[in-house]
Image (cartoon, rainbow, N blue to C red):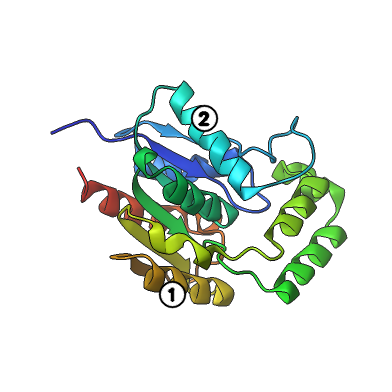
Amino acid sequence: MSDPRPLVLLHGLGQSPIVWQDLVSALGAGRPMHAPWMVGLRPKDPIGFDLAAAAAGLAEELELQGIQRADVLGVSVGGSVAMHLAVERPDLVGRLVLAGPIVRPSAGALRMQKLALRLMPESKLLDMGVSRPRMLAVFDALRGFDGLDSIGRIAAPTLVVVGARDRVGIVAARQVVRAVAGARLETVEGGSSLLNADRPRELAELTRAFLDEGE
């Protein structure tokens, strides 16, 4: 049996790479894992976020590390970056796990999220390891974003996971499954839009089973 491919973990909105600790522990030490900051969200990056730039930055990082092909698990906006990478650099992506990916966000939902972010105490943002201006830049980048324009070109085997409490995410997940050939959907009871934070063990179990199919 060949060694498992590296697994790249792309965090979601309002998160930093440290959020993956519980999921990494649940997956165990059987495969190499990488949880990078995405371009535009790293603490020293200029303020601003672009999905294409984030995907290109990830591709460059994988190539610099000598990783020719990796499996990718992306949550929320990390899922959107993962989809973009799978479309533009299919040679780099083995299997794809999308947890609550953002596909076609409504203007109303983005406005509500921006309002909630502006009302959040600075101390809480610091505890989360995120920057308010960077988060606002992500919301601005998602305005008018329509991932359905391209995701039909995804060739990687794809698993979509959604929390049962994530009503917006359920709609997006079904859109992805309809658009991506062979994609399948799993629902996590009690889960929200950020399954790596509130249901890491369940997400780890589904991810492990799906990745093992490709070994």
Amino acid bearing label 1: Arg
Relative to residue 74, is residue 121 drawn left or right? Answer: right
Q: Is residue 4 above or below residue 159?
A: above
Q: Position of residue 161 (x, y in %)?
A: 42, 63
What residue sits right under mark 2 in the picture?
Answer: 60
Residue picked out by circle 1: 174
- The residue sitting at 85% across, 48% down in the picture is 122
Residue 44 at x, y percent in the picture: 75, 30
Decide: few, some or many residues near mark 2? Use Cα within 10 Å; few <14, some 14-19, many ≥20. few
Instruction: Quarter of the image for the N terminus: give it.
Output: top left
Q: Position of residue 189 (x, y in %)?
A: 44, 72
Q: Which residue ends up furthest to the left in the rendered image?
A: 1
SS of the residue under disc 1:
helix
Answer with mark 1 or mark 2, whichever residue precedes in sequence.
Answer: 2
| Secondary element at image label 2 | helix
Marks 1 and 2: which is nearer the front? 2
Q: Is residue 207 left or right of residue 8?
A: left
Measure the alpha-carbon separation of dots 1 and 2. 31 Å
Q: Quadrant of residue 2?
A: top left
User: Does 178 sit above or below residue 138?
Assistant: below
Q: Which amino acid type corresponds to the residue marked 2 in the rendered image?
A: Glu
Q: Quadrant of the C terminus?
A: top left
Coordinates of residue 163 in the picture (x, y in percent): 49, 69
